[in-house]
Image (tube, rainbow, N blue to C red):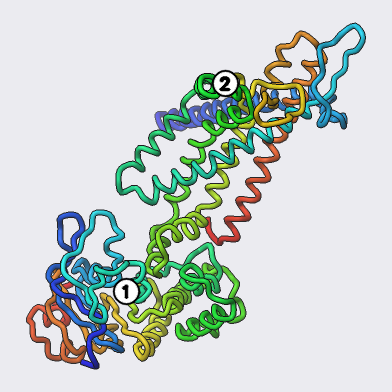
Amino acid sequence: MLGGDKIRTEHLTAYYGPKPAISDVTLGFAEHAVSAIIGPSGCGKSTLIRCLNRMHETVPRTRVEGQVVLDGEDIYQLDPVRVRRRVGMVFQKPNPFVTMSIYNNVSAALRFNGRPSREETDRQVVRSLQQAALWDEVKDRIDAPAVSLSGGQQQRLCIARALAAEPEVLLMDEPCSALDPIATAKIEELIKKLKEEYTVIIVTHNMQQAARVADNTAFMYIGKLIEFGPTEDLFERPKESLTEAYITGRFG
Amino acid sequence: MIHFDRHARRKLLSHTIAVLSGLAVIAVLYPLVSIVYEAFVLGGGVLFQAQFFTAVPPNACSALSCQTVGIGPDIVGTLILIGIASGISVPVGVLAAIFASEYRARGLGRAISFTADVLTGVPSIIMGAFIYGYFVIYYPTIAYSAYTGGLALSAIMTPIVVRTTEEGLRVVPNSVREAALALGITKWKATLRIVLIAALPAVATGVLLAIMRAAGEAAPLLFTALGSNLYPTGLGHPIGALPLLIYFFALSPYSNQVKVAWGATLFLLLLILIVNIVSRLLIHRMAVRMGGT
């Protein structure tokens, strides 16, 4: 593993109503690395990352036990709004604010969370769009509606929007599942670059994608963490027979 | 041949249904067309005189004079009453809808929707009578005033605003709320400045619908605004309104007052028609600019 853990879970159990979606997950995510979480549908991988920025609790009748430790502090002891400013998220389906322009989407966090100057906002919008590899495509129509972009561009816009909030950790919940292969390739390229500045955690149902982008990979099955380690080890020398069965395509 | 019979029967049925639908369309359109036609024929003459919009309503005909003059005080009165009613019902209705749709964890949200539905069905005269009854006991000096009239109209508008705003908010996809919250935007800012903005076309529709409904109501104003033939001098006094003028003058035995009632009817009809068309255009443009529905 590279460096120390930026964020880790300790005996994390998350419920929807009375039913736990993940149980007793203890897992550390290395700083400035890409960590992937893989597993079949319904294994709890999305629930897990939604606990890392306290989005899980925004759904009615949900509850979390255990700890999520960010830089040594349990985020469940902090203000959720502050946690989400430090831990950004990109969702499965591109969800730009449809009422806003490209510029206003990217600057949303800045504008709603503070009172930045116009120059400061401009600078941040350009920087975030460049980081998300979208700047060249939109620089001439920055005030166009966000919905005028293609699906792949919209997802990169959502990445830029998350980055503009200057998070330390970036969570990505199957960010490519609604995209075509070319858009997917662009976003994977981007993910590899983002780890220089951020700690990236990506949920994917696509094992090849995990193999391509992740330094570490966790395999989950029915709400439990089965195996976690350097991506190469997990795919080439899995310790658990369940992991081996999954990556060789015997189920899932 | 059976085959032929079936075919003929099907054809006959199809024609019958077409004819019946056509008759139903006529039945629906006939009242509207005849009201507009009648209002034009009987009220058109007075409406297109310049002083009609500014002069005060006429007294009864006497041996000396029989003028048809204007509806100025009632236009101003209706605007004031609608202004007061909107000032109450828009913020209250929108906030109640936000609570019902965005903070519905405690089951109170459902109670709000239910209450709004029931209130929509309460006859408007009861709203007026209730408000009159309350004020005449506790604040008798303003029982007949623009305040009570506006309040009575707001009781009619609020449930409409609540229901349409609620529907509008419900249509905003949850992914919008999640996107806002995940950026560390506080819940109230996300609700007011992102979710509500996305629902704005629906909110605007609701408000205009409510205004059009309230602008034509006479019943709740009978006990409250009371009506007046003079320009309003303050909000604490009885005040005129177009539907009240129509109600009183339509029953008048004097031809000049009946004529003014028709003129006011035509004016109210045209007003509602214009507000309807303009609001549709505006809302459409707003929805297009937002790049949505």
Closer-to-camera residue (B213/A179): B213
Amino acid bearing label 1: Glu
Percent position of residue A56, x then y:
27, 64
Q: Which residue sits at x=34%, y=88%?
A: A195
Percent position of residue B226, x then y:
65, 20
In this orientation, does residue B124 appear?
Answer: no
Which residue matches tag 1? A174
Q: Which residue sits at x=54%, y=35%?
A: B157
Crowding at label 2, few (<14), some or many (≥20) Cα neighbours within 10 Å? few
Closer-to-camera residue (B86/A185): B86
Question: Which residue is the extreme one toward the right?
Answer: B64
Percent position of residue B200, x then y:
54, 52
* Image position of A169 with respect to B123: above or below: below
Q: Quadrant of residue B81?
A: top right
Helix, strand or loop at disc 2? Answer: helix
Left or right of A214? Residue A113 is: right
Closer-to-camera residue (B21/B154): B154
* Image position of B99 with respect to A11: above or below: above
Q: Are marks 2 and 1 in contact (CB under 8 Å)?
A: no
Quadrant position of the C terminus of chain A in the picture: bottom left
Q: Quadrant of residue A59?
A: bottom left
Amino acid bearing label 2: Pro
Which residue matches tag 2? B140
In this orientation, does residue B237 appear?
Answer: yes
The answer for which chain carries disc 1 is A
Question: Which residue is the extreme one toward the top?
Answer: B63
The label number, if any, that marks residue B174 in the structure image: none
* Image position of A159 with respect to B99: above or below: below
The answer for which chain carries disc 2 is B
Helix, strand or loop at disc 1? Answer: loop
Percent position of residue A25, x then y:
15, 73
